[in-house]
Image (cartoon, rainbow, N blue to C red):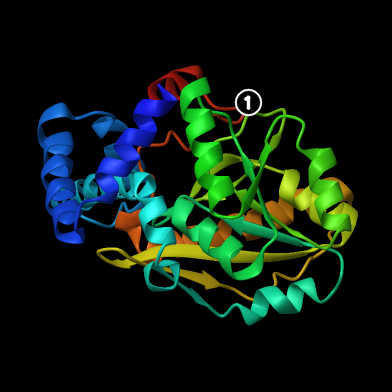
């Protein structure tokens, strides 16, 4: 199966950008209008995030998001092609913020999200400022091997989320960078509830815990698609660590701060986010059972 994925990567790598754009637009329309895979999830998410917009506006946004996600999937398979001209495919903006954070000598924690082509964005960090480690959830065996090879070929070191603390701490002691994608639903055992588009969202607290424990600087890296085959990774200044009355409140507060950065980036380019994800699936304990069932 991994061999078939590599063959598909080679084949898609032969396509010109115009063909990628045309196929993604057609398949995005097929997804939204005919297949409707997770369309209800997308509609519910968009209604939560943008209640001020009309149904027609949200529908156009959902259709555009489908095209974006198809484009992103094709582009992931085309990463070996982009590597050959990486400086043209991904432009890194404001990298001096990364270097300033690294100069503190305690490692760099980088928060990002499923914006633009996030795989190319993280590869952009690695190409410009290696060594870089990426904390990831596991795929199935074949896809896991394919994606690991793809990421390592771009200069990334992969840290599986299960049992990630020790390798992360080791990387920070070497003054290296570790990237967290912080915009996915978390379980109560590893997350805290913070506001995300006006609704409590359970969010992984590990980034804030590590920042508090190590004193490592936290920066945000925002990937976004500028045009066909052209991507930008914008590095933001270090996020000040703001201690609160106790450690628990500090972790919750900083997780909220990191989440707000991601929310602001999504608002700037809403069609380029992962709206199919059930971001609010884990609900606070006080949520009525009927409401929780409806959101699930």
Q: Quadrant of the N terminus?
A: top left
Place of residue 14 in the rendered image (x, y in percent of width and height, measured from the top left): 24, 50
Tell which of 170 and 44 is nearer to you. Answer: 170
Task: Decide if residue 81 is in sight here.
Answer: yes
Instruction: Give the left or right position of residue 60, taking residue 207 as reference.
Output: left
Q: Residue at x 39, y 57 (%)?
A: 116
Tell which of 81 and 106 is nearer to you. Answer: 81
Task: Decide if residue 249 is in sight here.
Answer: no
Instruction: Give the left or right position of residue 240, taking residue 104 as reference.
Output: left
Tell which of 291 and 153 is nearer to you. Answer: 153
Instruction: Report the number of discs.
Output: 1
Tell which of 231 and 220 is nearer to you. Answer: 231
Q: Residue at x 38, y 73 (%)?
A: 88
Place of residue 2 in the rendered image (x, y in percent of width and height, measured from the top left): 43, 26
Place of residue 286 in the rendered image (x, y in percent of width and height, measured from the top left): 61, 27
Write down the quadrant of residue 102 in the picture. Answer: bottom right
Instruction: Give the left or right position of residue 43, taking residue 262 as reference.
Output: left
Instruction: Give the left or right position of residue 7, taking residue 178 as reference.
Output: left
State the residue position of label 1: 285
Mark 1: which secondary structure? loop
Mark 1 packing: few (<14 Cα in 10 Å), some, or many (20+)? few
**Placement of 133 over or under 44, stated as above or below:** below
Place of residue 33 in the rendered image (x, y in percent of width and height, measured from the top left): 11, 36
Q: Residue at x 59, y 33 (%)?
A: 137
Q: Residue at x 33, y 49 (%)?
A: 72
**Placement of 94 over or under 108, stated as above or below:** below
Q: Quadrant of the C terminus?
A: top left
């Amino acid at each position: 199966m991994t061999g078939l994925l590599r063959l598909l990567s080679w084949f898609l790598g032969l396509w010109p950008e115009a063909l990628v754009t045309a196929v993604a637009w057609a398949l995005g329309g097929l997804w939204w209008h005919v297949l409707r895979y997770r369309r209800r999830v997308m509609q519910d998410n968009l209604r939560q995030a943008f209640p001020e917009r009309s149904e027609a506006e949200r529908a156009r946004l959902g259709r555009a998001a489908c095209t974006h996600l198809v484009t992103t999937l094709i582009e992931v398979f085309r990463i070996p092609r982009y590597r050959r001209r990486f400086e043209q495919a991904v432009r890194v903006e404001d990298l001096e913020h990364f270097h300033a954070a690294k100069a503190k000598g305690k490692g760099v924690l980088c928060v990002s999200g499923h914006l633009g082509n996030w795989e190319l964005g993280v590869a952009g960090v690695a190409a410009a400022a290696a060594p870089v480690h990426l904390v990831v959830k596991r795929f199935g065996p074949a896809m896991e091997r394919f994606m690991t090879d793809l990421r390592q070929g771009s200069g990334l070191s992969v840290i599986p989320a299960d049992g990630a603390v020790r390798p992360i701490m080791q990387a920070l002691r070497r003054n290296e960078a570790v990237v967290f994608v912080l915009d996915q639903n978390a379980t109560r055992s590893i997350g805290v509830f913070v506001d995300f588009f006006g609704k409590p969202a359970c969010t992984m607290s590990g980034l804030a815990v590590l920042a508090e424990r190590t004193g490592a600087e936290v920066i945000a890296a925002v990937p976004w698609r500028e045009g066909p085959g052209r991507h930008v990774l914008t590095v933001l200044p270090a996020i000040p660590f703001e201690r609160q009355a106790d450690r628990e409140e500090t972790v919750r507060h900083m997780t909220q701060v990191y989440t707000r950065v991601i929310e602001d980036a999504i608002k700037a380019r809403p069609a380029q986010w992962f709206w199919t994800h059930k971001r609010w699936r884990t609900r606070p304990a006080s949520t009525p059972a009927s409401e929780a069932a409806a959101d699930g």
